[in-house]
Image: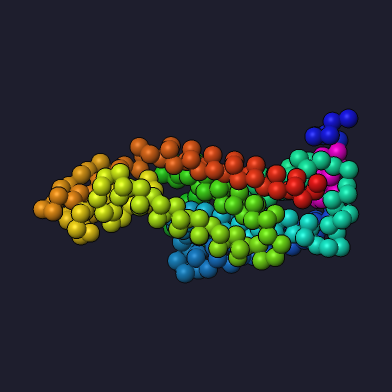
Amino acid sequence: MNNTFSFQRFSKLFMKFSKEHFYSYLLSIAVIMVLLAGLLGWGAYSGNGKVSVDTQRKMFSFFLLVVNVIFTSRIFRILWDKKSTVAELLLPVSPLERYLVFWLYSFVIFGLVYLALFFMIDMVVIQIGNIEQVDGNVLFNPLHKDFKLLDLFVSYAILHAIAFLGSICFKKTHLIKTAMCTVIVYLFLLFTNQFMVSWIFNRASLTSLPYMSVDLSPYNTPGSEKGTRGISATVDFYDGFNLFFPYESIDWVINSMLLTTTVLLWFAAYYKLKEKQV
């Protein structure tokens, strides 16, 4: 018998999990539908029936990320319930099978359900708005070249991985504790990056976000005006300079780093779950 993964055991666990959480997840879907319908409807009402593509794009991205973080941060709550923890952990399934069920529901299934709900409601709102529109509303297309779908997917994945790990690590107030830890880690990386830039260039660093522009001046005074992103280096009277990098040239670096971090966080969540089950 394969103790790591068995499709038969996995399918039975998946069906069991689906039956137990069917009504609660159905209620969550209803809440998301009401929320999306209300906000998209209010946007159409405020614009006299007009819903811009930019408004649809912002709502789609914002609620995808926020709602998924909230949902994922509670995905492991069954393991922290004293009444159901023992029975759940004694099920004859491997940690990988249990992990995949939680991961599929919070990452894959949630994303697919959200896509279906958003565009279903969006089309209804647009059709209603078109009644009083001469030119008509345009449905938001996530595959359009102006929409950075890859960047949204990377953001969705990294935020899911953070919330996923936080859900298994913290027993209560998962979302708040995960958010606090994320902010602390980000601030640590921010100050570390600024220190490293100052050490490398042997100058005081005014602004130095990871993978962003570098503003250096020995007198801690910006000597030249900051421009938009693009390759440029300007030298001032104090021998300081501002260096800007085009986002397109490092976009693949940022996404690769974030995806690598995402995979590591998913692995960490798996071993944390495995540790709990053992």
Choose top left, top right, bottom left or bottom right for residue 47: bottom left
Give the colour scheme of this rendering.
rainbow
The question of residue 2 being in magenta is answered with no
Choose top left, top right, bottom left or bottom right for residue 271: top right
**Residue 85 image point, x, y percent:** 83, 57
Residue 89 seen anywhere in this rendered image of the structure: yes
Residue at the image position 71 percent from the left and 62 percent from the top: 171
**Residue 103 image point, x, y percent:** 70, 46
Name the dominant secondary structure of the magenta segment: helix
* Viewer-proximal residue among 27 and 215: 215
Q: Is residue 252 left or right of residue 172?
A: left
* Viewer-proximal residue among 54 and 101: 101
The question of residue 17 being in magenta is answered with yes
Residue at the image position 25 percent from the left and 47 percent from the top: 202
Q: Which residues are magenta?
A: 9-18
Residue at the image position 31 percent from the left and 47 percent from the top: 199
Q: Is residue 131 left or right of residue 109?
A: left
**Residue 156 image point, x, y percent:** 56, 49
**Residue 211 image point, x, y percent:** 37, 45
* Viewer-proximal residue among 27 and 11: 11
Above or below: residue 51 compared with residue 242 = below
* Viewer-proximal residue among 59 and 13: 13
Q: Is residue 209 left or right of residue 81?
A: left
Above or below: residue 61 compared with residue 175 = above
